[in-house]
Image: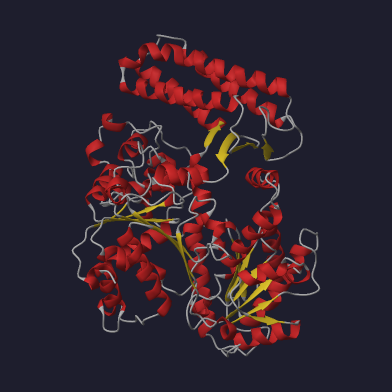
Amino acid sequence: MSALTRAVTAAFAPAGALYQAEPAYRPRAGQIAMAEAVAETIEARGVLVAEAGTGVGKTYAYLVPALLSGQRVLVSTATRALQDQLFARDLPRLVHGLGLPLRMARLKGRSAYLCLERLDQVRQGRTAPQDPQVLRSVATVERWARTTLTGDLAELPALDERSPAVPLVTSTKDNCLGSDCPRWQDCHVNQARRQALEADVVVINHHLLFADLDVRESGVAQLLPSTGVVVIDEAHQLNDTGVQFAGEALSSQQLIAYARDVLRATQAHARGMADWLVLCATVEQAVRELRLQAEGTGAGASRLAWQGVTPLGLDAQRWRFALVRLGQSLRALLTPLAAMEDMAAELQRVYARGALLLSRLAGFAASADEDCVRWLEVGPRHLRMLASPLNIARVMRERLLGRSLEADEVPDGAKAEQAAWIFTSATLGSDAQLSWFTEPCGLRGARVLRVDSPFDYAHHAALYVPQPFAVPGSAAHSPQVAQLVREAAERIGGRTLVLTTTLKALNAIGEQLRQSLGLFSDLEVLVQGEGPKLALMERFMAAGAAAAFASVPSGVNGSTRRGCILVASATFWEGVDLPGDVLQLVVIDKLPFPPPDDPLVEARTRRLESVGRQAFHDYMLPEAAMALKQGAGRLIRSETDRGVLVVCDPRLQTMGYGAELMAALPPMRLLGSEDEFKNALDALAGGHSL
């Protein structure tokens, strides 16, 4: 046993250092096994993929050995919520409990920080908004700006991250003035990067990790070479995030914004030296003509597959002509800019930015690579051309890990320069090799560890699949889901989370619930999108806590308690932690298979079928299993939690593949009838065991 492993074992032992960090800590065999595996991986400078079920305590399992290793540690999360939790709660407790004098830093993307120069521009009226509500939001930011030390907009919970005020007071790679900025020394982004470079432990997120793999922009490139341990938490999101950033995108908004920025820059620094108004207007007109070609399909599709040189459904000649015209208008604008870029730094920046846009446009005009999928997103006011790799295997091996896990043994000298990589999540696969995660991420050959949840699902949780039930996708399905949710939530006083697979179902179920409950119901219906995610969760938790302590007749409608039903989709399927009695019923509207018309799904399906594999069994089914497992994971979050999971899709029991999906779920007791379901709800309402 290595020195690090011995230190880790001692820290987790009774009366060890963890008791100093967490008074409520109790040893868990799975957590200790994972911590020892992490320690061994760090010693060997290897790669570990660890699936740790809910309740294992994976955060401490990787942090303790990483902190005790004496190496610089980089932790990446999928969400800013976990990033903030690690930095503000978990790390300070452990550093104190372990008695380690470590410096910690949190680094986010530039869009998370206040830009002082952009705020000055708003004050001076150069980018002042007209909307009074946006002006009020900017005023709130301005008051906070006088006292903040970090410039992290997360300090302003009242400011919705989707607020139109946010882009007014933050910078982007395109509009940042760089070292020419008059506020360069005070820049919050620069301060955060300097602190990260000086820290022993840095917490980032996956978006930042992939934002610029050449590390011109994110600041991560300077960190990786000197990092000894890299931990990827919430690793199940790594492939999707990496695919997004490893691809290319070009939108009508980008091009129009560029033309207008050029007009502003040239009016300030090169007025009268070219007919800038006409040149910029020509670019905008060419963008509009290109968008009109896409809108002219009449199909109403928001996404068009793009297998060849022309998106499917478009006239090839007209599309090509519009694309060429846009390229010509961009070149015409860049020609005088090239001759004048030395006159001012701002002109240099807009020229470089335009050259990059033109290069991207040329890429979309050529044929796509075999390992790439393209598609066109069309809306009433926007058009986006997108290209993406099918997975991040090559990116991971060549540009992040710097090694092939299937190669021969790495020489000792080279290994000494490598970081240890730890990938972990509660959901990484259903087979022994966790291939759902390891294959697309290029991690085949890594050490794999699976640690089951310590929770007693058999006695604390139950699964109900209502039979008979409307067919998913039929007109009767969403109303029937809403009816089941209403009747069940009334029995337990709310405390119900509904997870939908589509926005259409989200809106239909939410509207149906509100109509059936009426204005004077004891239950409030919250629908995702009607407020910030954090605000919805706080409201739900407050109502659930009140309902849990209310005096209620067991299982009787007309209860005096008030509670909430939260109808949500997308981001609520994971990363939502609602422990205790505030959540006792999770309803999933249908099996979460990937949408077959999604360009990435289509391309991955074609690729598998081209090599003789079955796309449904090898791709669609594992994707659904992992999504179902994530959704079910919202129900039981602690040793004392109790609840029922409802999947309103009869295919889970009637189709042959249902057994594979059931196997991905925790070992819950199966409720065989509606009466058993009602009895379980009544038990929850009365505070009894299931």
Q: Position of residue 573 (x, y in %)?
A: 57, 62
Residue nearest the viewer, comparing 136 with 642: 642
At horizontal 56% and vertical 19% (from top left) the residue drawn is: 327
Toward the viewer: 627 or 541?
A: 627
Residue occupying the point 38% across, 11% down = 339
Tell me residue 47's x, y (percent).
Answer: 40, 57
Q: Quadrant of residue 218?
A: top left
Quarter of the view holding residue 220: top left
* Side of 133 where 21 appears, left or right: left
Looking at the rendered image, the quarter that the C terminus falls into is bottom right
Relative image position of residue 473 (x, y in whole percent) = 77, 58
For the point 58% across and 33% down, the residue is 369
| The N terminus lies in quadrant | bottom left
Residue nearer the viewer, 375 or 260: 375
- Using the image, determine if residue 557 lies above or below residue 446: below
401 vs 630, nearest the viewer: 401
Estimate the x, y position of residue 558 in percent, counting from the top left: 67, 83
